Amino acid sequence: MHVLLIEDDVQTAAAVSDLLSRDGITVRHAPDGESGLGYAGDPAIDVIVLDWMLPGIAGIEVIARLRSAGVEKPVLMLSALGRSDHRIEGLDRGADDYLAKPFEPVELIARLRALHRRTTVQARQPVLICGDIELQVLARTAHRAGRHLALSPKEFELLKCLMEHAGEVVTREMLLRQVWKLNFDPQTNVIDVNLARLRRKIEEGFATGCLETVRGRGYRLVDAVAPVAQ
Amino acid sequence: MKRLFSSLAIRQAAISTLVVLVAILGFGMLALVSVRHAARADLLNTIDTDIAGLVDGMVQGGPTEVERRIADRTSFLPTMNAAPYYRLTDFRGHRLAGNMAVGPSIDPTRSNTTEVTIGSDIILARATLLRGGLTLIVGRSLGPIYRVERQLGWTLAAAASVVTALSLAIGLIVARRLMARISAMNSAFASFGEGIRAPRLRAPAHGDEIDALAGQVDLHLDRIERLLVAQRDITDNIAHELRTPLAHLDTRLLAALDHNRDEQVARTLDAARADIRSVVSLFDALLDIAMADPPGTEASRATIDLSELAADIGELYAASAEEAGLAFTTRIAPAVTMRGEAMQMTRLIANLLDNAFKYVPAGSRVLLSVAAGPVIVVEDNGLGIPEADRETVFERFRRSAILGEGHGLGLALVRVIAARHGLAARVEDAAPGARFVIAPGVRP
């Protein structure tokens, strides 16, 4: 995956580049909107990461110019503006996703992957498989090792979200946003409790666990049947 | 009707019309009384002259001369003036002359004057004693005076109604125009308060005080709008300036965490990262509370299904309630909709539930209900909130003395979000427990 990063803050740009390249993502950096627009047309670029507050042309304006130039590549807005009306405005103006700084690095990667998937043939897989867990997306049924898992609709969404990012860390914020459409973290431990319930349903009665808690970051669904690589 | 008269301009028109009406009627009555007075005096004068003439006849030719003069005078019927009436009687009361068949009871010794009805006519009559025990009564019809009075009365009534109608009509037209101009200002302010970009009044140049006021309104709406935008820009900048270094700090902590193998250090670094997150969320909440909606916000709002939204939130919290040993139930009326921002309303309900879950002891009941209005209620049977604290509980950084958790902005945000949607937040005694009610507020 090739990402175009349009970001004026050198430190953030370096950190994001470093982060993405460690995950095998190629990053091209543009320090302002002008040069960013120059690179955006390059067919090698898959996804654009765009800072909101840029010198010269503002991020919002960059999207408008991209779209009017016929560039339909997914754009993820990265911004230090975190209020909910900013998210709404960003998404209204044509951004495909919005992430407020400071963000969880795994979340940025997961979202970039998701945006990339949307544009490629991998999108809308009818069956998701992770180890011995199988999810029929359209029929909305889940099985582990052939045994049916009785999940509530929200638990199904939760498991689906985790399976779409199988092997990756999924943060609380991502789960809240994707499953419950919330852009804030309630003070009550709702996510942990709901995850604990899901874990009980997908692990109880099976020999191995498959849902890991990554302390301080989030959760990760792992392949329970693959031999553990040391 | 009551609504109509609550308008200042209409009231003013009604009052001025009433004043005009009272003035016309007052002056009219005065004119009528003085006309009646003058006419009667005139009539009495005529009667006196008549009597004097007849008395003179008595002196010159005795009763025969009087009878002759009476006959002369009654045979002449005046066209315009009041018809004359006479009666001459002897000491026994027998009529000697005159056209009054029946004598009115007037004391002739005092030259009394009285009103007498004769047939369909009302007359003013005066009696006097002549020599030889004769009594002379002379009268004049009051008919012409009454006719003049009636005419004057009708003229007055007609004038009063015409003037009243005119005054009312002009008053209402002026009132309407005045009202339209004042209403324009009112609605400009009202829509501004609701976050709608208010159209400027741009008053046509009458050059009067209301135009001057309209000009001031425009000026201040411009100024407020500029301030709101400036405030938004400033908070954006503050947010940017604060978040960027925090993001860097977070990146550094994460890098340290990646290279670290010590469990104790990892715990500390994780805690530090959690602190950064709570600073950011505190900051977001503070900015959110401090921000006023700039004009144009209302236009971006859509109709949202509050019932569905509340049901989703209820489901999310159900597991946590069970875990905490709370009996959590929802009572949600179907298809309650409102205009608003879904995420903000979700946050409002979540904050109310967070608050309830945090403060009620295990084993308590918590109820979330949504009804048309919209009315959102979160009720518990926990410790309740002392009456003195029921208003301050919505103030920022106000926390219950019982537990010191959280940043103390949850309920402040509830009130702010409610206000942005034209709703008011209050807390009541659920005896026992607390009942938070979000319902349409009284519009100023």
Image (cartoon, coloured by chain):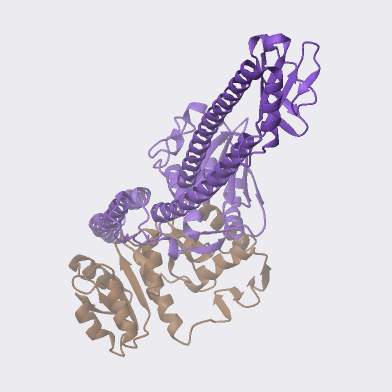
Chain colours: A brown, B purple
Q: Would residue A1 be visible to someone looking at this image?
A: no
Vertical position of residue A119 compared to residue B438: above or below: below
Q: Which residue extends farthest front?
A: B61
Q: Nearer the viewer, residue B311 or B41?
A: B41
Q: Position of residue A213 (x, y in %)?
A: 47, 58
Residue in view at x 53 percent, y 49 percent: B162
Q: Position of residue B28 (x, y in %)?
A: 52, 36
Q: Nearer the viewer, residue A211 or B146?
A: B146
Q: Nearer the viewer, residue B359 or A218?
A: B359
Quadrant of the rendered image containing residue B297: bottom left
Vertical position of residue B72 compared to residue A37: above or below: above
Q: Would residue B388 be visible to someone looking at this image?
A: yes
Q: Position of residue B410 (x, y in %)?
A: 44, 44
Give the tally of numbered discs.
0
Left or right of B20 in this view: B121: right
Q: Nearer the viewer, residue B323 or B279?
A: B279
Q: Which residue extends farthest bottom?
A: A43
Residue in view at x 48 percent, y 71 percent: A166
Q: Quadrant of the C terminus of chain A?
A: bottom left
Quadrant of the rendered image containing residue A47: bottom left
Residue in view at x 40 percent, y 43 percent: B409
Q: Quadrant of the N terminus of chain A?
A: bottom left
Q: Position of residue B337 (x, y in %)?
A: 59, 59
